[in-house]
Every structure is written in structure tokens, then in C-alpha cells.
Amino acid sequence: MPELSRSQLAVYAAVAIALLLVGARAIRAEGGETAPPSAAAADSNEAEISLEGGGGDLVVDVAGAVRRPGVYRMPEGARVVDAIERAGGVAGGAAVEGINRAARLTDGQQVVVPERGANGGAVSSAPGDGAADGPISLGSATVDQLEEIEGIGPVTAAAIVEYRDEQGGLASVEQLDEVSGIGPATLDSLRDRLQP
């Protein structure tokens, strides 16, 4: 067997070390173990992307009455309840009955866990008036918030809330087709303004 030069030995050693590091990283990722977020990160109001579970297909924003609001990566097929748990669970004063925890998540969705108001009802804890901030959550929207959407008047807004309460929440915007006063044309115009 021919003798190896020092430069060849150095190259082989570097390749071996690189393979060991890649293998160690793969084993660590396979175990799904990640370090818990620091207390400073948990108390921060800044959104943080959690890479727990790696390989997730959805990115969702969890806000409102949760322990660690932020942006989280979730696996395809995850439900709203999974996103709430990933955000540390509900905080004290949360009105979880104001959202559909069984609804499937969609990429880019914002899950807002409302806070309980002084009268015991759900109060949206999302910043802003809802009209300019993006889609309104069907799970927690009030009649007043729904009325702000073009194409929804007071009667239709009340009918949506009544239907949502009867059904135990709404899993998709398409379910609004069952509400009296909302036809296919109106439903198409509402898709960008509402989320489950």
C-alpha cells in the first residue's frame, strides 16, 4: 500500500470530521429535541420563528392571549389547538370559546386567541381595527368587526355569528355559503378578508 502524504491525510481527516458533524446533526434532528426558548425570548413581544419539529410545511402567527406569541412552523395538517400549544398554551383570561380550535391551519394564517372582556365575552386582542390589518378570524370576530367588511351588513354579520355559534365554530370560509344572505359571489369577495 502506498504511503499517504501529509496533505492527503489532512484532507481525509477534514472529510471524516465533516461527516461526523453532519451525522451528529442528523441524529439530533431525528430526536426532535430542541432547547427551550429562553425566558427573555418567552417574554418578548417580538415574533420568533420556532423551528421545533423541523420540516414543517406551514408558518402561522399565533397572537393574543397565549404565553409565547410569535411565528411558528407547523406540520401540514396541524390544527389551531396545535398552534396554541406550540405558543405555550393559553394565558390567563383567554376566551378559547371564541375560536375554533379544531380548524386546520393554513400557511400564513394568524391565530388570534381573544381575551375575555369585562362582561365575560370575547374581546379581540389583535392590534388595530381589523379592517386594515388583514383577514379577520371567523372564530373570534364580533358582529361589529364583520360589519366593517364591504359586503357584510348588520343582518348578515349577526347571521354569521349565529351560524358560527350553532356549529361550534367554522373550519373554513367556504362554510359561509350555508349562511342566509351569502351567495357564491359574496363568498368570493369575502375570501381575502376572512380566515377560519
Image (tube, grey):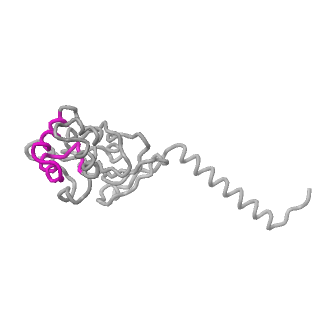
List x then y, in percent, for residue 102. 31, 36
- Residue 162: within the magenta? yes
Instruction: Report the side of 17 relative to 55 (left or right).
Output: right
Residue at point 24%, 49% (across, down):
190
Instruction: Report the side of 156 relative to 173 (left or right).
Output: left
Q: Quadrant of residue 94?
A: top left
Vertical position of residue 118 compared to residue 39: above or below: above
Instruction: Report the side of 11 relative to 127 (left or right).
Output: right
In the rendered image, the quadrant that contains the C terminus is: top left
List x then y, in percent, for residue 151. 17, 50
Q: Residue furthest bottom?
A: 7
- Count of marks placed on residues: 0
In the rendered image, the quadrant that contains the N terminus is: bottom right
Q: Residue furthest left?
A: 119
Residue range in magenta is: 136-165
List x then y, in percent, for residue 165. 17, 35
Q: Quadrant of residue 126?
A: bottom left
Vertical position of residue 175 compared to residue 62: above or below: above
List x then y, in percent, for residue 3. 89, 61
